[in-house]
Amino acid sequence: MARLPRLTVPGYPHHVIQRGNNRQAIVSNNADREVLLDALSDNARKHQVAINAYVLMDNHFHLLLTPETADGVPLMMQAVGRSYVRYYNDLHRRTGTLWEGRYKSTLIQTERYLLACMVYLDLNPVRAGLVSDPSEYAWSSYRHFSGQMQDRRVTPHPMYWNLGNTPFAREAAYTEMVRVGLDAPSQRAITDATLQGWALGDADFMSELQKKTDRRIAPSPRGRPPSAVHKVV
């Protein structure tokens, strides 16, 4: 069966995951990390995509993106994939692909899942056992949103600005959200939707979103439709 095209609609946040081939490393040192993040930032600007949050791990990365155009995210990811693989292969004297196939992505309901997705990204290094607190990890947007540094790569989403009337209030509110973390169902919902390519939101959101795209946004109900029952009179 032919695979569905990626779901991408302008103005909505998209959670994107790109993994290394066979879960192998996509960065070997901090210089590689800087080059990859700069490539993401440069191509996001070029293709009118806002990077709302990110986390870069050794063998994959997560992005929370809001595109202005329908083809912004695909063009951005295609450009990054080509330029970074060329850089990495030349520098490390290797050949062949670096990525595990196509990137994975989902479109999420802003009000319900955007901040949750940010927390999901920022806790990734903690879940992986790399650090005990996200503030200890240098390769995510957490330090920007918690007030520890300014990250030029990040464009805060309006939902983040709604956390408080002052920078301190927003930073404190977001830090507390990350401290509390996500419950297991929310974490699983974000993971599953992204890997499977289905939109994530409540029934009203899904209904309105489906009107804006010809692409199916959720899996079809399982099983055969119930048979009609004919009443004998």
Image (tube, helix red, strand yellow):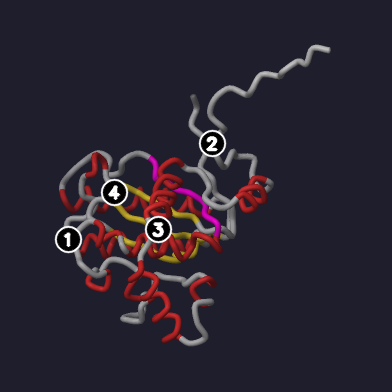
Q: Position of residue 215 (x, y in %)?
A: 60, 39
Please state the extent of the stretch shown in magenta in the rendering: 102-109
Q: Position of residue 146 (x, y in %)?
A: 36, 78
Distance between mark 3 and mark 2 Cα atoms: 23 Å
Q: Where is mark 4, residue-wise?
A: 85
- The answer to whether residue 167 is magenta is no
Q: Where is mark 2, residue-wise?
A: 219
Q: Quick one: SS at disc 1?
A: loop
Distance between mark 4 and mark 1 Cα atoms: 15 Å
Q: Position of residue 51 (x, y in %)?
A: 44, 64
Q: Position of residue 120 (x, y in %)?
A: 37, 60
Q: Where is mark 1, residue-wise?
A: 29
Number of other residues with Cα within 10 Å of mark 1, as a class: few under 14, some 14 to 19, many 20 or more: few
Disc with the residue nearer the chain's start (3 vs 2)? 3
Q: Where is mark 3, residue-wise?
A: 63
**Camera-nearest residue between 185 and 146:** 185
Mark 3 or mark 2, which is nearer to you?
2
Looking at the picture, which amino acid does disc 2 mark?
A: Pro
